[in-house]
């Protein structure tokens, strides 16, 4: 069993670009039912993760409130939690250590190009099935 076995590929993951604004982030989170979403740069490199909480705190601190969200770049929003990524070539134990503290673990290649995510839910389901067998 390796990291690739748990990979939820980029083509099936909602994500934002560094050029996205706060309104786009809110819309994508709502549509995807995610509580946090990866951010990629123009080269497809993993930039970070934005959470609902990050958006809420930024909205609270924004003069003009909701009317101004389309003007706020996601890269300017303070991230309250650092979501660590894991290399596709890393040991399974490294990924499991991150998954213990994160709902999902972004997966990157050797050049930090975003490949997808590993959802903690999938890890738990896998181990639950295999422990029961």
Image (cartoon, helix red, strand yellow):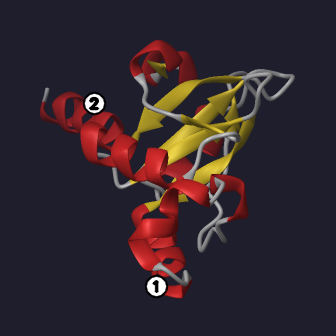
Query: In terms of sequence position, does the residue under pointer 1 or pointer 2 come before the other?
Result: 1
Above or below — where is 86 with respect to 8?
Answer: below
Q: Residue at x 86, y 23 (%)?
A: 111
Residue assigned mark 1 = 60
Q: Residue at x 51, y 70 (%)?
A: 54
Of 58 and 133, which appears nearest the observer? 58
State whether residue 33 appears in this view: no
Measured Cα–Cα span from mark 1 to mark 2: 39 Å
Quarter residue 65 falls in: bottom left
Residue under label 2: 126
Residue 46 as seen in the image, left or right of residue 67: right
- Numbered tag placed on residue 130 in the rendering: none
Residue 9 vs residue 97: left or right?
left
Find residue 26 and report its horizontal and vertical position in percent. 39, 53
Give how far across and how far down residue 27 sits, in percent: 35, 45
The quadrant in which residue 78 appears is bottom right
Query: Mark 1 or 2, which is nearer the eye?
Result: 1
Q: Is residue 82 above or below residue 13?
A: below
Q: Residues within 10 Å of mark 1 (few under 14, many from 20)?
A: few
Residue depicted at x 77% and y 26%? 42
Q: Is residue 58 above or below residue 89?
A: below
């Amino acid at each position: 069993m390796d990291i690739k076995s748990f990979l939820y590929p980029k083509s099936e993951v909602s994500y934002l670009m560094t050029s996205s604004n706060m309104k786009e982030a809110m819309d994508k989170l709502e549509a995807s039912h995610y509580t946090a979403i990866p951010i990629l740069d123009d080269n497809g490199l993993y930039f970070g993760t934005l959470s609902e909480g990050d958006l809420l705190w930024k909205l609270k601190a924004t003069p003009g409130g909701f009317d101004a969200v389309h003007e706020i770049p996601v890269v300017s929003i303070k991230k309250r939690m650092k979501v660590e990524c894991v290399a596709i070539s890393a040991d399974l134990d490294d990924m499991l250590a991150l998954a213990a503290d994160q709902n999902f673990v972004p997966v990157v290649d050797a050049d930090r190009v975003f490949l997808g995510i590993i959802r903690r839910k999938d890890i738990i389901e896998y181990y639950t099935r295999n422990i029961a067998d």
